[in-house]
Amino acid sequence: MERLPRGRHGLSPEFVAQNQCERLLAALTEILYERGYEETTVAMIGRRAGVSKSDFYKRYESKDACFIAAYNDAVERVREAVRTACAGGGNWAERALDALEALLVFVVEDPARARLVLVEGLRAGKGVYDRYQEALQSFVPYLRDGAPAPIDGPRPPEATDEAVVGGIASLLARRMLADGIEPIGDFLSEIGEFALTPYLGAAEARRIISER
Amino acid sequence: MSPLAHSARAKQFGGPARHELPREFVAFHKRRRIMDAIAELTAEQGYEATKIADIVRRAGVARKTLYDNFDGKEEVFLAAFDISVEEVMRRVEEVCAEFDGDWDERVEAGLGAFLSYVAEEPARARMCMVEAMSATPAATRRYEDAVQGFVELTGRNVPHSNQLPETIDETLVGGVAWIIHQKIRRHEVEKATELLPELAEFMLAPYRGVAEAEQGRIHA
C-alpha cells in the first residue's frame, strides 16, 4: 500500500486524512479476509496501511468503527459497479441480468469486499445488519421497476422480489465460502433463470438467457 | 395433578420443597428451563450480552446446576439451538407425511408448519435464525447445517428435472429464510403465518412448470 511521502509534502490535511482513511479501510478489509474479525487488530491494520496507531485513532474511534466504515465503503462499491453495468439501457430482463452479472464479476474480482458485504453482513453483529438489509433492498428495483405485466395471471407479490434477492445473496455467501462461483457464465444462467422466472415464466426466462 | 402443580403445592405447605417427582423428570425439566432461558435472553439482548448469571436467574436454577449439565454458555446455546431445530423439523415432517400424493399441497403445508412454529416461538426463531449467525463460529456452522437440512428436505418433496437450475432448492430456501429473518428483526414474526400464500407461491412456481411438463409427457 502506497504511503504518502515522508516529511513536509505540502499536501493538505484533508487530503492526508482522506488518504489514510482509504488505506485503513483497504487494510481492514484485506486482513479480515485473511484472518477473520476476531484475529484482526488495530495494530495489524495500522501496519498494513502504513498508518500509526495514533493516526488510526484520529480517523476511527475503534476497530468496530473502522469495520463499519469499511462495510459501507464496500457496499457503495458494489452498488456503483451494478449501476455502471446497467447504464447501458436495454429492456427490463437485459438490465436485470446485467445487474446480476456485475454482482458476480465483483465477487470474483474483489473477493475480500464481496465477502465483507455478503457474509459479514449477517454474521458480524456490530450494527451492520441494517446496512446489509439496505444493500439487498437496493437490488429490488432492478427486478421490480419496469417488470413486464405477465401474460397469464397477476404480478408476483412484493415478497417475491425480496426473496429472489435474498435467495441469491445467501447462495453467493455460501458459495464464496466453498467452491466459488466460476465459471461466471454458468452461474449467471442459474441465478438469472431463478430471478426472471417469477416474472416471465421458466420457458421465456431460459430463452432470454440462452440468447444472451 | 401435574407434576409442577404437585411441587408448587409441596412448597405451599411450608418447609423446604421436597422433590416428590422422579429425579430424571426434575433434571430434564431444569435442562429445559436453562435452554428456554437462553432463547429468551438472546432474543432480548443478544448472545454476547447474555451472561451465565442472567441465564441461571431467568431459569431459576443454581449455577452449579447449569455447570452440571453444560460446559458453559456456548454449550447451552448450541443445545437450545439443536432442540429447536429438531422440534421444527419434526413438526414439518409430520405435516408433510399427511399429504401422500400431492407434492404442492405437501410443500405448502410443510412451509405453513414452519411459519406456525416461528410465529408461536418468536424467541426460539430469533435465536436460531438471527443470533446463531453471529454468536460463535460453531453456532454459525449449526445454522448452515440446519439450512442444508431444509434444502435437502425440500429436494425430497418436489418434482425434479434437469431443466431446473441445480441451485434452485438452495436459492428458494435462502429466499424464504431471508423474508422470515427480516420479519424477526422487525419484531413482526408473530404474524409470520400471514406470509404463507406469497411464500408458497414463490416456492412452488419453479417446480410447477416441471410437474406440468411431466404430466404432459405422461398423457401424450
Image (cartoon, helix red, strand yellow):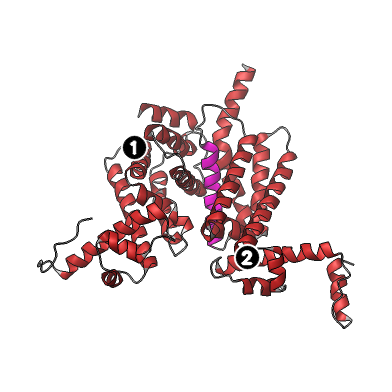
Q: Is B9 in front, or is A132?
A: B9
Q: Disc 2 marks which amino acid?
A: Gly
Q: Which of A92 and A128 is in front in this view?
A: A128
Q: Can residue A181 be seen in this view?
A: yes
Q: In this view, does B205 lie above or below A115?
A: above
Which residues are the magenta region?
A: B168-186
- Which image quarter: residue A148? top left
Secondary element at image label 1: loop
Majority SS type along the magenta span: helix
Return the x and y of residue A168 as percentages of the image width and height: 46, 44
Residue for badge 2: B72
Q: How crowded is mark 2: few (under 14 residues within 10 Å), some or many (20 or more)?
A: few
- Is disc 2 placed on a helix, strand or loop? loop
Q: Position of residue A31 (x, y in %)?
A: 35, 56
Q: Is residue B50 above or below residue B110?
A: below
**Which quarter of the rendered picture does the C terminus of chain A lie within?**
top left
Inter-mark Cα distance, 2 to 1 = 57 Å
- Examine the structure image and report whether residue B42 is included in the region drawn in magenta: no
Q: What is the x, y in percent for residue B12?
A: 86, 80
Question: Which x, y percent locates residue A52?
Answer: 26, 68
Q: Which residue is drawn at 49% across and 31% down?
A: A202
Is residue B122 visible to us here? no
Q: Quadrant of the N terminus of chain A?
A: bottom left
Q: Write down the chain letter for disc 2.
A: B
Quarter of image, res A85: top left
| Most foreground residue, B62 or B212 | B62
Q: What residue type is labelled 1?
A: Asn
Q: Residue at the spot x=84%, y=75% of the render?
A: B8
Q: In this view, does B5 lie to the left or right of A156?
A: right
Q: Name the residue under label 1.
A: A91
Question: Does the magenta portion include B170?
Answer: yes
